[in-house]
Amino acid sequence: MYRHFFVVGALLAPFIPSVCAVPLPTGASITPAGTHTAVDSFPVNMVLSRDGKFVVVTHVGARQSLTVLDSTTGEIVSQRDFNGKDSAGVQRALFYGLAFGPNGALYASRGTEDTVSVFDLSDNGILTDAGQTLANAPAPKAPELCAAGIAADAANVYAANNNTTRATSLKGSLSVFDAATGERKGLVVTPGFPFGVAAVTDGPAANRKVFVSSERDGVVCDIDPQGMKVRRNIRTQANPTALLLDGAQKRLFVANSGSDTVSIIDTATDKVVSTILLRPAAAHGLPGCTPEGMAIDPAGKRLYVALADMNAIAILDVSVALPKVLGYIPVGWYPTSVVLAPDGRNLFVANARGNAVRIPNDTRQGPGGKLGQYILAIQNGTVSRVAIPNPAALKTATAQVLKNNRITSAVPVKSPLAGVPIKHVIYIIKENRTYDQILGDVARGNGDPGVVMWGREVTPNQHAFVDRFVLLDNFYCCAEVSGTGWNWSTSGMANEYTQRTVESNYAGRGRTYDWEGSNGGVAVDLMGINDVAAAPGGYIWDAAIKHGVSLRNYGFFVGDNPKTPQGGVGDEPGNRALKKALEGRTCTDFRQFALGYADSDAWVKINAPKTVSSKRYGKNKAPSRFSAWKREFDGYVSSGKLPAFEMVRLGRDHTEGTQAGAASPSAMVADNDYAVGQLVEAVSNSPFWKSTAIFVIEDDAQGGHDHVDCHRSTAYVVSPFVKKGTLDSRFYNTDSVLRSMEAILGLPPMCRYDATAPIFDFWTKTPDNAAPYKAILPPESVLRQVNARTAYRAKDSAGMSWNVADSIPDQVLNDILWHAVKGPKTPAPAIRGL
C-alpha cells in the first residue's frame, strides 16, 4: 500500500490509497452492490416504461441495442439490435436520447443518422416499429447533427443535436418535430453541444416550455417551442448534461458533469435556487465525480445521481432548504444512468464499463469467440438492480465507496521522491502497444512469449531500458483508446463527453476526432470557445504554467485546424498548437502525427529512403522527429537552460498496417524504438543527465493483445536515480506517471485520480545509475522492410487514413498486424469464454 499526500494551495490534503489486490486500470476498486445483468457496450441511458413494467436501455458502444429489462427481476425480456448497416449502407446507430411520450410511444435517438426512431412497447416487453421516423433532413443528409437527448409533450417531440456546425457559427440546435405527423417544424439554434432535454407537460406552461442543457457552454436554455426561439440561457456550472423534472414539474435538476454538482432550477422563474456539491469532503475540492443520470422519488424528497467517475450512486435529500448528500452506494464501473424501480425500494443502474476488473485479450472473447479481442468490443456493460439502503446501511456503503476511490483521509507521509534531486522531466508518449506485444519475452517479468510481436530484436532499446533501469510488469493505461488516452495521459482523467463520444466514434457511428484540441475540426480554444472535451482539472501544461514551471511541447495537441469556423484547412499555419497555453511553447518544426515521417534517424544512417514517404520537415528540413527535438536540445545544452518539463510525441509504433510501399509494421516499431534510444543517449551525454527523469508510456494499449488485461501496457522510467535492474510488480498506471512527474516538478494534482495514484517507488537519492546510454540500432534487415503489394490485407491498409490518430478501425488493424508479423497462415489466438 502506498501512502502519500498532495497540496492544494495552502491546504494539506492527505490520502491513503487503499489499493485492493486487483484494482481497475484507473486505480479505483469496485464492489458493485445488487444483482447484475450483462447488456451491450457502454449503456448510456435508461427509461422506465409508463406502466412501470419495464426498463429500456440504450447503448453507444461497439455493440448497440435497445434492451428491455423486467423492472421486477432485472432480467432481459427482449433486445432490438442496431448493429451492421441498413439497406443504404449506412451504419446503424443509437445515442443517448430515450423517452416515452404522453401517447406511450418510445422515442430513441439514432445519433449521427440524424433521426429519431419511434417504437411501440407491447405488454410483454417487445419493441415494434411504430412506422414513423423523425428525420432531421431528407436525403441527401444534412451535416451531421447527432440527435442526443429527447423529450416529448402532447404537441411535439424534441431532440437535442449534440454537435456544432460552421453554418451556425459553432452553436448547437434543437430539432422540433410534430408529434402527430413526424414532420420537422423547425430548428432552434442553441449554445454549443446541447445534450439533455426536458419538456414541461403539465400546468400553464404545458407544451410551451422546453429545457435544453448546453454541454459546452455551461447553460440550460429555456426554449419557446411555439416561437421557435430561446427565451433565456440559465447559467449553471460546467458541462451540464442530464436534466430531470420533479413530479410536480416545479423543479428542474441539472447534472453538471464538469463541476461535480447538481443545480436546481425553479421552472417558474428560471432561477437557480440551489447548487449541491457531490464530492466527498475528503476529496478536498478535486474533480472526479462526474454526475450524469438522475432519478427522483414520487414525493420529490430523494434524488439519486449516477457518479460516473466515483463508480457510485449519490443519494441526496432535496426536500430541505439546503439540499445535501446523504451518502453513496457502490456500483459498477462508470455508471451513467439510474432509474427508480416501481416498488420504490430498488434502483436500476447502468454501468457503462460493466463489472469486470481484468479482461485478458490474448485469446478471442465471448461465446464462440464472437466478441473477438479488441478492447472496446470485449467490454460488456451491465445493469445492476440495487436495493436502496437504510440509514445505517448507507453509512457502511458510503465508507466502502470512499475506500474504493482511495479517498480516506489520514496522516500524510513522505513521498517516495522526497530528497531525490531531479529537476527536469521529459515525458514521451507513444501509440497503442500492450505489455506482452513488446516485453512478453522478458523472462523475469509476467509476460507471455506466445503473444510477443516485437520482442528484443525489433525493440532493443526498450529491452535495454528494462534490463538496466526498471521493469514494470503491472502497469496499466487508464484509457481504452487514443481518444480517451490523450486526455488521461495529459489530464489524469477523461470527461463525460470524451468517454461517450469516443465510444460512438470508434464504433463507426460517426463523430469527428474531438479529443486533442479541436471540436468538429475547429481549434476552438484559439477562438476563446470552450473545448467540450477538456477534462475539468485542465491539462498538465496548464498546471506547469500556473506554477511557473518552464515547458516545451513537441507534438502534443498539434494540428492543421483552421482558427475560424469560416476558414478552410490551410488558412492558418500548419503544425500549430491547438491550445492557447501551448502557443509559443510548441516546436512547430516537430511534425505532428503523420506516420510516413520518421521518428528516428535510422533511415538516414542506413540509407533506407524507401521506408519514409516524407523525408524532410520544417524550416531546418529535419529528417526525423528526433532530429527536430535534438536541434533544440543542443541549443539548451549550449545555453545551459533546459525547460523543466518537455513533452514529446513519438507515435510511429502505431504503424501503417501493410499498406504497399510503406515501411512494414516491424520497421516502424523499430524506428520508434531507436528514436527513444537516441533521445535517451542525447540526454545521458549532456550536463542535464544527473538532474533528469525520462518517462515513456503508450497513450493506450488498444493495438494488441495481452494475457493479463487489455489495458496492460509498457512504461519506462529512465534516470540516474532509478535503482539498477529493478523489477517492480506493484500496481501502477497512467496517473502514477502524472503524479510522479507532478511530485518532481512541484505541481498539485489535476483531479482525484492523479491525486490518489501510487507514486513510483524505485528511486535512489544519488545518481548511482549515471553511465551514459548508447542507443542500439535495430537490425537493418528489420529497418529496411517495406510492405509488398502481396502483403496480408495490403489493399485494406491502402484504403485507410493514417495521418489522424485512430481514424481506422483498430480491430481490423490488429488482425493485419498479427498476420503481418506472425505470418498469414498463423491462426489468431484461440477462443476464451467470458
Image (cartoon, rainbow, N blue to C red):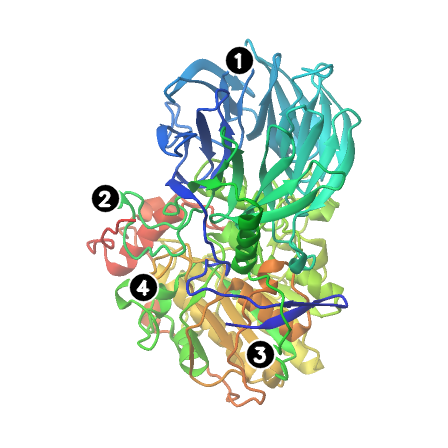
Identify the residue position indicated by label 3 in the image. 416
Identify the residue position indicated by label 4 in the image. 453
On residue 103, the disc is: 1
Task: Please state if 35 lies on the left or on the right of 735 as rendered.
Answer: left
Label 1 is placed on what type of residue?
Asn
Task: Indicate which disc, 1 or 2, sits on the residue closer to the N terminus.
Answer: 1
Determine whether label 3 and label 1 are within 8 Å by CB: no
CA distance separating discs 1 and 4: 57 Å
CA distance separating discs 4 and 3: 35 Å
Q: Residue 499 placed where, x, y %? A: 53, 46
Task: Indicate which disc, 1 or 4, sits on the residue closer to the N terminus.
Answer: 1
CA distance separating discs 2 and 4: 25 Å
Foreground label between 3 and 1: 1
Q: Judging from the image, what secondary structure is the residue with disc 4 in?
A: loop
Give above or below for 432 relative to 438: above
Is there any visible trace of residue 599 in the rendered image?
yes
Task: Answer few, some or many: residues within 10 Å of disc 2's Cα (few below 14, many 20 plus, some between 14 and 19).
Answer: few
